[in-house]
Image (tube, grey):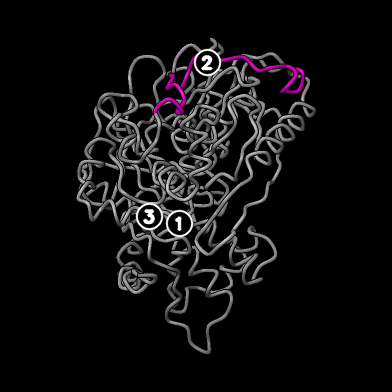
Amino acid sequence: MTALVVGEQGDVLARGYREFAQLFPRPGWVEHEPDDIWTATVAACREALAATDVAPTCVGITDQRETAVVWDRRTLRPPRPAIVWQDRRTTGICDRLRSDGVEDRVAELTGLRLDPYFTGTKYAWLAEHEPALWSGVRDGGLVLGTVDSYVVARLTGGAAHVTDPSNASRTLLYDLSKGGWSDELCDLFDVPRSALPEVVPSSGVVGTTDPDSFLGLELPIAGIAGDQQAALFGQACYSPGMSKCTYGTGSFVLTNTGSSPVRSDAGLLTTVAWDIGDGLVYALEGAIFVTGAAVQWLRDGLGLIDSAAEIEGLARTVSDSGDVVFVPALTGMGAPHWDPHARGAILGITRGTTRAHLARATLEAIAFEVRDVVDVMVTEAGLEVPELSADGGASANDLLMQLQADQLGVPVRRPVVTETTALGAAFLAGLGTGVWGSTDELAQTWALDRRFEPEQGRRDDGRHARWRDAVPRAGGWTR
């Protein structure tokens, strides 16, 4: 959990950070305790505020999307852990709905796919497997939301139950064309519409923090966006065609498509980018589930490195991966392959393979995964991606950024402030309270740290073709 205090020039004045536990109760299941999310939020904000004398004027929130949270409307206490976006337990529900022939209709309404990734499938699982809890949802004592809704409820002492279109559009319950919750989809996933939050604009005052709940502060909450849309906003990608990739636990490529949704038949998602008060702005997205998480696995699961930052130095000790290919489908595959039954695979290992080769293969895999998404954007959706804006923790890895530029064949630009997810939330809140007057003014705050130019000949040197051969071998593993 990260908290930033952002100044009027778009500079980061102070930071706070707290980790919270990720739970893995069964293979393929991923959960968080919502109380832990809230405790970490307050602690990170307290740390950030203690590090600066500048008094905050408003609050913006950005969150992991698709995670399903249930909490008591009155006490705000959650009766069960949140089901995290990476969780795969709803694969069977998705397969069943697909067999029922509803996938095309769901895609038409939502711009999404039938995949365990999305919130609606998680609610359907709760309705099916935890009937006592779902009875409380139907009775109105329990409410539903993604992490942003839960955090706003805690910030306001329960006064507000809201979300924004960027988060709502990731639930499989939101009609992309009508711009609101769909009764048809709520019926399909057995979700009572009365339990869902009100959909409000991404920028503008939607509530006030309760001093008794939040560090004695009474501040307007004026910005809400899902993490990837917030990063697009923080990267100042305000014009159609501008693209970014956030390198986090997963990696997410988004292209602003303006006021018209662009549909994809080749594995990309059509989503709402934001609504700052003058109508919906849409984006085309490629969601890759495991990139930075693969580096974490090398650290925590295999013990090959002591910290994530070590991977660059280790990977640089070899000139290539020694023909090793790592397909990091540790929680299935997202865009553009979409295979919840896939699992990770490491191919091409010999007795000469070292941990350095595996480290380099991991960085190459991230670059290959992003290239797969961008290639679809260019060839299938007809979008131009003349350059890519990079952010997120792994964007600090110079070797990865160079590998990415080489694979895309276009420049990759990294801003001075790479925490653009939090920056985007701050921009939305400040725009909604008059700190900034327009997106043009916000764009002036963006500053370049480094631009990575592609090396000639590297895009078509055969490494990506070998990766494409390896991907199907990891597919369908749990069928």
The label on residue 89 is 1
Q: Secondary structure at mark 2?
A: strand
Residue 267: x %, y % from top left: 28, 51
Residue 265 vertical position relative to residue 216 in the rendered view, above or below: below
Give the label on residue 206, or none: 2
- Quarter of the image where the N terminus is located: top right
Q: Amino acid at mark 2?
A: Val
User: Circle 3 is placed at which residue position?
Assistant: 334
Q: Position of residue 83 (x, y in %)?
A: 52, 47
The amino acid at mark 3 is Gly
Q: Does residue 169 appear left or right of residue 53 in this picture?
A: left
> Does label 1 or label 3 sit earlier along the sequence?
1
The nearer-to-camera label among 1 and 3 is 1
Residue 439 lies, in percent from the top left, at: 43, 19
Q: Residue at x 29, y 37 (%)?
A: 110
CA separation, marks 3 and 2? 33 Å
